[in-house]
Image (cartoon, rainbow, N blue to C red):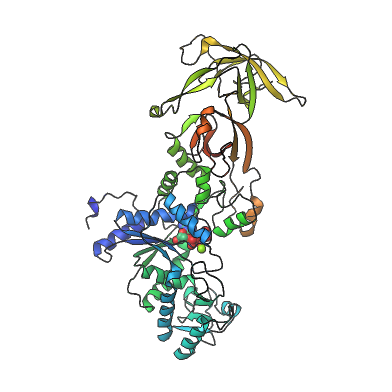
C-alpha cells in the first residue's frame, strides 16, 4: 500500500503503525474496528477516547466501524443506556457502519461452546463460586483441578443442555474452559465461560437463562463481525492469551487481533460507570447529564462541544504506557476555550446585580449603543444595546472602602462602562443590614464610547446591563465535583465531593438574549463561557451553565 501518499487525518500512533503493516503485508484487506460499550450506564469522556480511536482509525484507511452493545450481563443492562449511547456517539460526530448487539449472537456463542465441549476443551462444573475462587491459586501458586474436570464429553453435553433448559438455579452449575490450572496466567486457569442467570434481558427477554462470560463472548463477537483490530484498554492485556485461545479453539473463520492502549483518567472526577451510577442513584448529582459529570451527556449539557472533546482526545494521543494516564481536567477547558473563542457571541451578563441610578441622565431617554458581537471575529457583526438611567453592575465592582489598586467604583471614583460612558459614584444606599443596595452616579456625555474622547483616562472598565430592558437569568456556576482524585481509594470518593461544586445565582442579561435557545453559547464579559441549559430553561426563564471561566494558569 502507498502509505506515503495517504493523507492521514490523525496523528500517528503505535496501533496505526500496526494497521499500516497489516495492510502492506496483505494480512488484512479492509480495516474493521468496533466500539463495544456495555449498556450499563452512560458514556463518559474516557469512552470518547476509545470512540475517536476506533472510528478515526478505520476512517483513515477507508475501513468500517461497528457500534456493538456488549450486552451479555442481563442484570445491569437497560435500553435507556442503549439509547443514550447511540445519541452520544452520533453527537460526537461518528456514524457507525453496523449496529449490533452481542445478545443477537447468543445462539452462535452457544454452538461455539458446544464445539469446545466436543473437543474436550470445556466442562460443566458443579462447584460453588466460592469453591472455584478458592481453588484458582495465586500468582505464585498453581490452582487445583476441579473434581468435575474429568467428566465425559457426553455428560458435559447433556449437562450444558440442561443448563440452557433452565433445570438449574443461579450459580448451581457453570461451564468452564479446560485449559491449565497451573498456567502462570491466571486467566487461563479453566476460566468460567457460561453461567446460569435467571433474569430478563433487555434484548432477548426470557429466551435465555445461561449467559456467556465477557472474556469468552468478546472475542467471538469480534470474530463474528470480522473485526480486524480489536482495541481495548490495558487491563485486558493479560486476557489476550485467552482471547486468542477462544478464537482458535472455537474455530472462528475470522481472526481478530486485540491491541491494548492506556485508559484515560481525569483529575477531580470519577470515571467508572459504577461510581457515576452511584452518584446518580444517591442523588449527589442531577442525573447522568448533570453538568458536573464527566459523562458525554453532562459535558454536552455543560456546553462542551463535540469538536473540543475530539481535539482534546486527539491531543492526548494513544500510548501503551501504563502509569494510569490521569490528565489535568484543565486541559479539556483549554480546548473548549479555543473552540468557542471565535464562535461565541460576547455579551454582558450581571451575576450578582447592584442597581445604579445615573442621576443626571434624562429620565425617559433610552439610547442604543453599538457593540461588537465578537471583537476577535469581526464577521460576527455588531448589535445595538439599550442604555438608560438605571443599570445593573456586579456587586463586587463597588467597594465602600476599597484597598489600594482597586480601580472599580468607590465613592468619588470614575470608571468606564463598557461601550457606554464614564460614570462617577457620588452616593450609595444601604439596607437595614448595612448591605449596599443602590449607587447614585453621574455620567459625562462627552465620554461616549467611540466618540474619540481623550480628555481624561480611567483605570477601570466594568460591564453592565440596562435595568429597564434586562432579562432575568439564572446562572449555574460549577467547580470540580471531587476535591481530590480519589479514584483509587474505592469507597471514599463520595466523602470527597466538593460542597461548592454547584452555586446558583440570579442575575440579568441583555434584552437580546430573549431569543436564546438551549445550547446557545455565549461569552459573558469578565466571567467566562456559558451554555443555555437545555433542562431548566423555559420560555420564561433563562438558565445558563458556566462552561469554563476565561482564564486559567494552565496552558497546553
Ligand atoms: P467503566 O469502567 O467506566 O464502566 P468499561 O470499560 O467497563 O468502563 P465499557 O462499556 O466496557 O466500559 O467500555 C467500552 C469501551 O470503552 C471499551 O473498549 C473500553 O476499553 C473503553 N473505555 C472505557 N473506559 C475508558 C477510558 N477511561 N479510557 C479509554 N477507553 C475506555
Ligand atoms: Mg464494563
Give how far across and how far down residue 521 sits, in percent: 49, 37
Quarter of the figure with the C terminus: top left
In the figure, residue 112 lies in which quadrant?
bottom left
Query: Residue 342: which quarter of the image?
Result: top left
Q: Judge by depth and name the residue closer to the eye, 150 or 238.
A: 150
Q: Is residue 440 left or right of residue 77?
A: right
Q: Is residue 454 above or below residue 465?
A: above
Identify which residue, 291 or 214, lies in the foreground. 291
Q: Quick check: 174 above or below 241? A: below
Q: Is residue 253 left or right of residue 505?
A: left
Name the residue rendered at 24%, 64% in the picture: 25
Q: Is residue 59 visible?
A: yes
Left or right placement of residue 264 versus residue 388 in this view: left
The quadrant holding residue 387 is top right
Counting every numbered tag in the picture gives 0
Closer-to-camera residue (68/361): 361
In the rendering, at what x and y percent does residue 490 appear? 61, 59
Amino acid at each position: 500500500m502507498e502509505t506515503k501518499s495517504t493523507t492521514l487525518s490523525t496523528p500517528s500512533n503505535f496501533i496505526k503503525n500496526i494497521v499500516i503493516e497489516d495492510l502492506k503485508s496483505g494480512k488484512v484487506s479492509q480495516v474493521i474496528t468496533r466500539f463495544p460499550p456495555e449498556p450499563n450506564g452512560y458514556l463518559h469522556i474516557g469512552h470518547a477516547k476509545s470512540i475517536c480511536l476506533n472510528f478515526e482509525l478505520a476512517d483513515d484507511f477507508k475501513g468500517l466501524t461497528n457500534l456493538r452493545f456488549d450486552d451479555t450481563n442481563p442484570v445491569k443492562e437497560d435500553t435507556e443506556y442503549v439509547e443514550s449511547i447511540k445519541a452520544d456517539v452520533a453527537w460526537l460526530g461518528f456514524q457507525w457502519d453496523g449496529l449490533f448487539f452481542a445478545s443477537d449472537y447468543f445462539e452462535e456463542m452457544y454452538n461455539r461452546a458446544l464445539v469446545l465441549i466436543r473437543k474436550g476443551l470445556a466442562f460443566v462444573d458443579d462447584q460453588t463460586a466460592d469453591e472455584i475462587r478458592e481453588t484458582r491459586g495465586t500468582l505464585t501458586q498453581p490452582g487445583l483441578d476441579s473434581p468435575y474436570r474429568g467428566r465425559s464429553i457426553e455428560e458435559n453435553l447433556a449437562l450444558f443442555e440442561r443448563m440452557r433448559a433452565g433445570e438449574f438455579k443461579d450459580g448451581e452449575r457453570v461451564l468452564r474452559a479446560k485449559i491449565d490450572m497451573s498456567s502462570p496466567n491466571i486467566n487461563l486457569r479453566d476460566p468460567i465461560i457460561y453461567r446460569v442467570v435467571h433474569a430478563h434481558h433487555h434484548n432477548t427477554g426470557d429466551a435465555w437463562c445461561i449467559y456467556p462470560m465477557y472474556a469468552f463472548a468478546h472475542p467471538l463477537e469480534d470474530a463474528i463481525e470480522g473485526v480486524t483490530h480489536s482495541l481495548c484498554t490495558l487491563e485486558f492485556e493479560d486476557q489476550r492469551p485467552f482471547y486468542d485461545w477462544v478464537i482458535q479453539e472455537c474455530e472462528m473463520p475470522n481472526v481478530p487481533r486485540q491491541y491494548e492502549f492506556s485508559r484515560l483518567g481525569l483529575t477531580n472526577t470519577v470515571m467508572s460507570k459504577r461510581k457515576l451510577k452511584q452518584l446518580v442513584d444517591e442523588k449527589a448529582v442531577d442525573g447522568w447529564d448533570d453538568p458536573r459529570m464527566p459523562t458525554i451527556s453532562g459535558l454536552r449539557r455543560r456546553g462542551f462541544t463535540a469538536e473540543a472533546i475530539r481535539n482534546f482526545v486527539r491531543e492526548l494521543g494513544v500510548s501503551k504506557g501504563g502509569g494510569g494516564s490521569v490528565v489535568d481536567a484543565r486541559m479539556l477547558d483549554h480546548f473548549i476555550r479555543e473552540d468557542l473563542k471565535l464562535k461565541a457571541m460576547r455579551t454582558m451578563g450581571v451575576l450578582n446585580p447592584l442597581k445604579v441610578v445615573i442621576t443626571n441622565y434624562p429620565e425617559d431617554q433610552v439610547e442604543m449603543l453599538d457593540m461588537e458581537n465578537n471583537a476577535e471575529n469581526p464577521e460576527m457583526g455588531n448589535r445595538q444595546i439599550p442604555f438608560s438611567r438605571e443599570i445593573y453592575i456586579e456587586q463586587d465592582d463597588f467597594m465602600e472602602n476599597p484597598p489600594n489598586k482597586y480601580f472599580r467604583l468607590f465613592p468619588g471614583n470614575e470608571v468606564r462602562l463598557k461601550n457606554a460612558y464614564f460614570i462617577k459614584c457620588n452616593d450609595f444606599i444601604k439596607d437595614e443590614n448595612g448591605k449596599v443596595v443602590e449607587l447614585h452616579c453621574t455620567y459625562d456625555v462627552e465620554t461616549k464610547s467611540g466618540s474619540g474622547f481623550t480628555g481624561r483616562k480611567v483605570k477601570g472598565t466594568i460591564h453592565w446591563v440596562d435595568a429597564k430592558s434586562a432579562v432575568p437569568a439564572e446562572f449555574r456556576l460549577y467547580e470540580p465535583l471531587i476535591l481530590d482524585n480519589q479514584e483509587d481509594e474505592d469507597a471514599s470518593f463520595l466523602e470527597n465531593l466538593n460542597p461548592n461544586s454547584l452555586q446558583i445565582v440570579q442575575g440579568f442579561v441583555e434584552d437580546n438574549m430573549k431569543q436564546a435557545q438551549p445550547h446557545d453559547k455565549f461569552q459573558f464579559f469578565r466571567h467566562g463561557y456559558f451554555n443555555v441549559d437545555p433542562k431548566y430553561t423555559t420560555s420564561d426563564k433563562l438558565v445558563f451553565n458556566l462552561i469554563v471561566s476565561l482564564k486559567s494558569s494552565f496552558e497546553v
